[in-house]
Image (cartoon, rainbow, N blue to C red):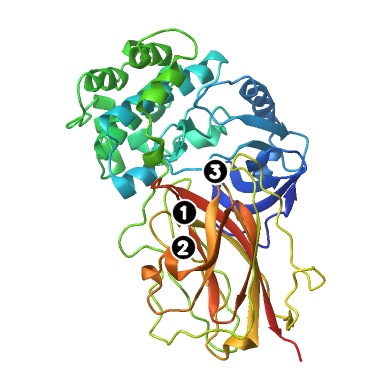
Amino acid sequence: MERLTEDDPVEVGPYRLIARIGQGGMGTVYLADSADSGSGNVAVKVLRADFARDEAFLARFRQEVGACQRVSGRCCVRFLGADLEASPPWLVTEYVAGPTLAEYVASRGSLGYRMLTGFAAGIAEGLAAIHTVGLVHRDLKPSNVILSADGPRLIDFGIAHHPDDTSLTATGTVVGSPGWMAPEQLLGETIGPATDVWAWGATVAYAATGRAPFGTGPTREVSQRVLSGLADLTGLPDPMAGHVQSALSPDAGSRPTAAQLLTIFTKTSEPGAISATLADTWQSSDTGVLQASSGARSNRWPVVAGMAIAVATVAVVVAALLTVNRKPPVSASSATTSTQPTISLTTRPSSAKSSAARTPTPTDPWSMAKFRPSNERSLANLFRAFSEQPNYIPDFPLTMNGCGSRAMRTHWRSVGDAITAGRVDYSDTPETATRKDARQLATATSGWIDTGGCEQPVFFVGTGGQSTLVDITYETRIYEAAP
C-alpha cells in the first residue's frame, strides 16, 4: 500500500480514505474507513475521470454493478455499494486482510496438497457464484486472489472493462499479461465463463508449483504456448493435474464448468459444501503468514538531529510487494528519556470495527504536560507487520540530540485482528528485540502510545504460536519540550 498523495481525495461518499491499495487501468483502489456506516474497513475503487464521461461504458458499468450485488459466493469479497452518479463514480467492497496468492508464493513457496485442494475448491466456488448471476471475472490471476484466514477470496470481479483494455494495439500486441489470458482473449474473441475456467487452471497450477504454467519470456513466445496448450504441469499432483489440464484446453467448449469443478473438489453438489471443504483443508494459521524474507524485515530509522523526516512509501500490490527494505542504523548507544511515556489502548473484540483515527491535541486529558506540539509535520501512513519479528513504524522520528528534547504521540490501528504494542529504547540492533525488551505491552486493535525522543513504538503480531500478518495505520504527532 502507499500513502495518499496530495491529488487524492480525503473522503469518497461516507468513507474516509486511509491509503492507496493499488492503481490500474480502471482507476484507483483505496483502503478506507467507514465508521459512520458501520462496515469497518473497506476497499473503495474510484473510476478514472475519462471513463466517467463515456456514456456507453457507464451504461454497462451500471448493469454489472447491479449484478455484483447479487453475487453471494462464500469465496468472493462482498460488494457493499456504489455511487454511479458521483463525479467520478465509485464502488466499494469489503476489505479482506491477507496476502495475495502471488505474495504468498513469493514468500513461502507453493501450497501443500491439502491447502491446495481447499484453494482449488474455493476459487471454483467463487467463479460459480459469479457465473450464476451472468458475470465473468475476466482477470483471474495470482494477484487477484487473497488468502484470508478462512479461505481464498476472489477480488476485482465482474466490473465492466473498458473496450480498450482488451483490444490489440497498432502493432498487434495484446494489452495485458498473456501468461494469464485465455486463448480467446489473446485472439480477441468472445469471452465467457469458460475464460474464467481457463484462468482457474492457470492459477491453480501456479499455486501448486510456484511458477507460471506457460513460463516466462517474450510475449510472442508465451502467447504461442497458451494458444497451443503447452502448459508445464510438472509437479502437479494427481488427480488434480488432470482437472487442471482439462481447464487449460485451448478449446473453450471442452473445458469443465466452474460448478463441475466445485462438485469434483467438494465431492458433493449440495449447497454450502465449500464451508465443510475449507474447514477440512484450509490451514488458517499458515494462510495468514507472509514472512519477510532475510534482509527484508522492518528496521529502525534514526533521525538526524534537527531534521524532520518524511514518511517513506510502503508499497503492497495488489500485485506484489510486501515491505520497504531499510538497512539497520549505524551503532549508537541506547539512552533513556526524562519523560514518562504512557500507552493508552482501546481494547475490543477482534471482530469489532476500529474507530477512526484522530489528530491528538494538547487538550486531551492524557496530554504530556512537559511538552507542546511542535511545528513539524505529523506523519501518517500504513505499513505491514509480520509475525515472528519486532515491527517498527517506518521513518519514526527518533532523535539522538537530547532524548528529552522531543516526544511523539502515536495513534495506531490494526486493520485486522488484535496485536501487541509497546515501546522500546533506541538500539543499533533492532531486529533482535523481543517482547521482553519492550515495556508497557498490551494487546488491542487500536490505541495511543506516547514515546520519548530515544524511544519508539514496537508491534508484535500473532499470539499462542499462531502466525499472521497485519496492516497497521498510524498517525504520529511530534512534540517539543515546553519552555
From the image, tell me which residue sits under label 1.
Answer: 461
Q: CA distance from mark 3 to mark 2?
A: 33 Å
Q: Position of residue 21 (x, y in %)?
A: 55, 49
Q: Secondary structure at mark 3?
A: loop
The residue drawn where x is 59% and y is 21% is: 71
The answer to which quarter of the image holds residue 37 is top right
The numbered dot on residue 25 is 3
Q: How many marks?
A: 3
The residue drawn where x is 78% and y is 35% is: 85
From the image, tell me which residue sits under label 2.
Answer: 391
Q: Position of residue 415 (x, y in %)?
A: 58, 48
The reply to whether callout 3 and callout 2 are in contact (CB within 8 Å) is no
The reply to whether callout 3 and callout 1 are in contact (CB within 8 Å) is no
The residue drawn where x is 60% and y is 29% is: 78
The reply to whether callout 2 and callout 1 are in contact (CB within 8 Å) is yes
Q: Position of residue 331 (x, y in %)?
A: 38, 85
Amino acid on which the number 2 mark rests in the picture? Asn
